[in-house]
Image: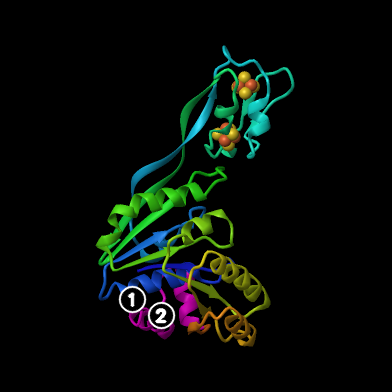
Amino acid sequence: MRIAITGGKGGTGKSTVATALAVELSKENKVLLIDADVDCPNDDIILSIKLKKIKDVETMIPEIDKDKCIKCGKCSQVCRENAIVQIRGEFPILVPEQCNGCKSCKIVCPVNAINEAKQKIGEISIGKKGNITLISGKIKPGIEESSLIVHAIKKYIKAKEKEFDYIIIDTAAGTHCPVIAALLDVDLGIAVTEPTPLGNHDLILILELMKQLKIKSKIVLNRSDIADKEIIEKTSEKFNSKIIAKIPYSKKIQEAYSKGEVIKDKGIERIVEFLKRK
Ligand code: SF4
Ligand code: SF4
C-alpha cells in the first residue's frame, strides 16, 4: 500500500508523522519510507539513519556550438524557464540552474547548433534501520525543478516496491509540482494539518488537489488542542475526508520534535489501526 503524508502548510508535522508512522508500522511490516521533501530532507535525522548515496540524478543540458550558431535567438524565445538569455546579435547564454532539460531549444534550433550534455541536479541516497528502508532525495542547491528528483526516486523504486508491505511518501509542503509528482499513483493521501485558520486554508488546497488527482484523502489533526477543531471538522465534512487521528500538543512530543527524534503517541497507533482495516 502506497501512502502519501502530505499537507499544504509547512511546519504542520508531516515528517514527524511520516517517521513515527514508519516506526509503528515497521513493528510488524517491511516499510519503505521515501523522503520526497527534496529541498530539505530530514527523515534521516529524525530516524538517526546514516544515508549512503546510490545515484546521481542528471538531466540534459544544452551545449551551444558557437561554430554552428547563427544567433537567431529561437532557443531563448522557446525556453519557458528563461534558462537561455540572448542579447540581440550575440551568442545565447545559458543559465544552467534554470534548465529543466526539456530539449525544446534543441528542437527549434534551425542549424542543429545545440548538443546534449548532462548536468547533475541532485542525488538519491539509501539507509536502513530494522524493517525500515529510507530512500531520500536531495536537490542540488540553486536548481529549481525539484519534481525531477521526485520522479527519479519513483523510477528508481519501481522495481523494488513489491519487497515492502507499506510505502510511505513524505512529500514537500504546498501544492506545487514536486508535491503532485509525489502524490501520483498513491493509494491514500493523509493530509497533516493543525486547527488554525492558516492550517485550514492550506488543508483545503491540498484536499482540492487530491480530489482533482482522484486520490482518496484522510486527515490527521496535529496539535489538535491548540485551538477550536471545528474549523477542520467542517472542511473534513465538506471534502468527505475523515479525521482518522488527532495528536495533541504535548511537552513530551515537542521535546522529541526539537531533538529531532521520533514521536510516540496514541494518534500514530490510530493511523496504523485505520490502515490495517484497509
Ligand atoms: S532544455 Fe528546455 S529548459 Fe533547458 S535551456 Fe533548453 S528549452 Fe530551456
Ligand atoms: S536556436 Fe540555435 S542558432 Fe539560434 S541562437 Fe539558439 S543555438 Fe544559435
Q: Is residue 257 above or below residue 110?
A: below
Q: Would you name the residue on which mark 1 appears?
A: 24
Residue 158, position as x, y percentages in the image = 33, 54
| Mark 1 vs mark 2: in front | 2
Marks 1 and 2: CB-CB under 8 Å?
yes
Determine whether 10 is above or below 244 in the image: above
Earlier residue among tags 1 and 2: 1
Q: Which residue is mark 2?
A: 271
What residue type is disc 2 on? Answer: Ile
Q: Quadrant of the N terminus?
A: bottom left
Q: Could you say whether the residue bearing mark 1 is in a helix, strand or loop? A: helix
**Residue 149 or residue 238, whichever sits in front:** 238
Q: Is residue 56 above or below residue 274?
A: above
User: Of the residues shown, which amino acid type is indicated by label 1?
Assistant: Glu
Which secondary structure is most common in the magenta stretch? helix
Give me the residue at 38% from left, 73% from top: 21
Image position, residue 181 (x, y; %)? 49, 55
**For this view, does 89 lie left or right of residue 252?**
right
Q: Quadrant of ligand 2?
A: top right
The region drawn magenta spans 250-278
Calculate the distance from the C-alpha at mark 1 to the C-alpha at mark 2: 10 Å
